[in-house]
Amino acid sequence: MKYKVLKPFVDSESDAYFAIGSLFSSSNLEREEELGKQGFLQITENYSFPKVDESLLAEAKMLKIKGYTKMTEENLIKAIEAVKAKKASEGNGE
């Protein structure tokens, strides 16, 4: 399960840093519960990454946008618009 991080921390098992709003998961359920009790995780809900429109993903892939599979829909739209604007301005300058 994935849980929303409420307070930043470094995981003692993986040495990974988790910022506020990021998602945390572990195979150690006791650890997840303990982090929740200490206020680091929101354990009342199981989080997953929101679904992104498939056509946006396809367009980002075609435009070769790095990291597009991990972007939110809002950030993906901004990245696509930025690449299109850059290509348009490059086309006008030739």
Image (cartoon, rainbow, N blue to C red):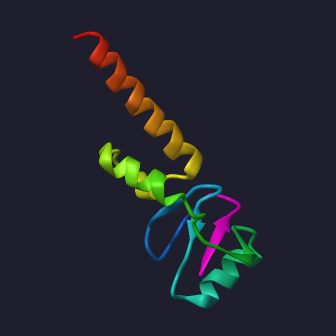
Quadrant of image for the N terminus: bottom right
Q: Is residue 36 left or right of residue 56?
A: right
Residue 56, how many percent across, how many down?
47, 51
**13 versus 28 height, above or below:** above
Quadrant of image for the C terminus: top left
Q: Residue at x 75, y 69 (%)?
A: 39
Q: Splitting the image into 4 quarters, where does residue 31 fall?
A: bottom right
Of residues 38 and 81, the one nearer the viewer is 81
Q: Residue at x 32, y 42 (%)?
A: 63
Total marks shown come to 0
> Is residue 67 visible in this depiction of the protein?
no
| 32 inside magenta stretch | no
Residue most extreme to the left: 94
> Is residue 69 visible in this depiction of the protein?
yes
Residue 49, how many percent across, how many down?
57, 66
Q: Is residue 58 left or right of residue 51?
A: left
Of residues 88 and 51, the one nearer the viewer is 88
Q: Residue at x 54, y 44 (%)?
A: 75
| 5 inside magenta stretch | yes
Tell me which segment is drawn in magenta: 1-8
Q: Splitting the image into 4 quarters, where does residue 24 fall?
A: bottom right
**14 versus 53 height, above or below:** below
**76 versus 44 height, above or below:** above
Residue most extreme to the top: 93
Residue 26, how many percent across, how many down?
53, 81
Q: Residue at x 43, y 55 (%)?
A: 57
Of residues 38 and 57, the one nearer the viewer is 57
Residue 5, how many percent across, how many down?
65, 64
Of residues 85 and 10, the one nearer the viewer is 85
Q: Is residue 24 left or right of residue 55?
A: right
